[in-house]
Amino acid sequence: MSKAFASQADLEDKKITFEQLSPHCWAYTAEGDPNSGVIIGEKYIMVSDATATPAMANDLIAQIRKVSDKPIKYVLLTHYHAVRVLGASAYAAEGATEVIASRGTYELIVERGAQDMQSEMERFPRLFRGADSVPGLTWPTMVIGDGKPGRQGSLEIDLGGVKVHIWHPGAGHTRGDTIAWVESEKVLFSGDLVEYEAGVYTGDAQLEEWPTTLEALRELKAEYIVPGRGEAMKGNADVNKALDYTKRWVTTLFQAGKEAAAADMDLKTAMAHTRKSMDPVFGHVFIYEHCLPFDVSRAYDEAKGIKNPRIWTAERDKEMWAALQG
């Protein structure tokens, strides 16, 4: 294993794709880097996931301006991770007046947003180029729901000619994950609840609940999905492929974590044990080596009964990495 974080050596720019999926919905994807979604109405635009920095957000804004001059009024935070939210300030100049998040996401920003920002910036320097343009933590102006999963706490936004339904479907990638669902066009913006052919980061996850949340998303019968990472999927069969991919990652990982915890393995041994089942299936995908140490750490913790994920700090990152170098 590398003596530095795998992501610190990942310096090559990715090919960005901005493609239209339906009359009002677009996907902004980048070969395994974090995706964003765009919904363009006759009056307003909504962006789902703001990118890592204002400098990066400006590239997405430039893509949007090739197809629409409407104000970007809404920015949705599908969860609290820095790589998804710290670009939000760039949209203010484009008309953004509302930053939307679930109750769970707001609470996580309060609890660990500052530590997460420092941790992520040090782990993944390429994604935080232009970090000096970040004014600080991103805070929602609209907090939806009461932390309980389900559509009873949903928000409906009319962008003009298209309505977007936003709610917390259940815990998974974090305890506050939020989706955007354009029911009239069967397009789902899932955030990191769903990935495809890319690493599934689970360092702050609720692994036991995640498969149930995925099945709740399957019930929507989406025809398109913009996952957190990986290509946008078109057609219900391919949407299910992405759901199955994520579910297999989560269940395979957690089973290995439970076995490691039951045998009271140390972290390095738990990593080797987990690789036996994960490497043959997932070892080839984008950011696999970056995700796996954090994933194994969280799976072991949850299997040991630590329900609320321990906060990742830059110091804890280094301690974990040192334990794996052994």
Image (tube, grey):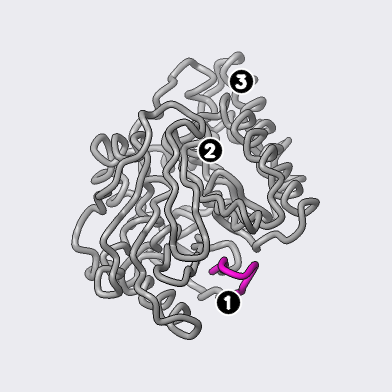
- Label annotation for residue 258: 3
Lower sequence index among marks 1 and 2: 1
Residue shown at 29%/51% (left/top)? Answer: 117
In the structure shown, which secondary structural element does the residue marked by tag 1 occupy? loop
Question: Mark 2 falls on what kind of element?
Answer: helix
Residue 47's x, y, as percent? 43, 63
Q: Which of marks 1 and 3 is in front?
A: 1
Disc 3 crowd, CA 10 A, few/some/many (<14, 14-19, 20+): some
Q: How far apart are marks 3 and 2 (CA)?
A: 13 Å
Q: What residue type is labelled 2?
A: Asp
Please say whether residue 24 is one of the residues in the magenta stretch.
yes
Whether residues under marks 1 and 3 lie with C-beta atoms below 8 angstroms apart, the answer is no
Q: Which residue type carries mark 3?
A: Lys
Q: Which mark is residue 295?
A: 2
Task: Tell me where the magenta segment starts and ends, as one range.
Answer: 17-29
Residue 288 is labelled as: none
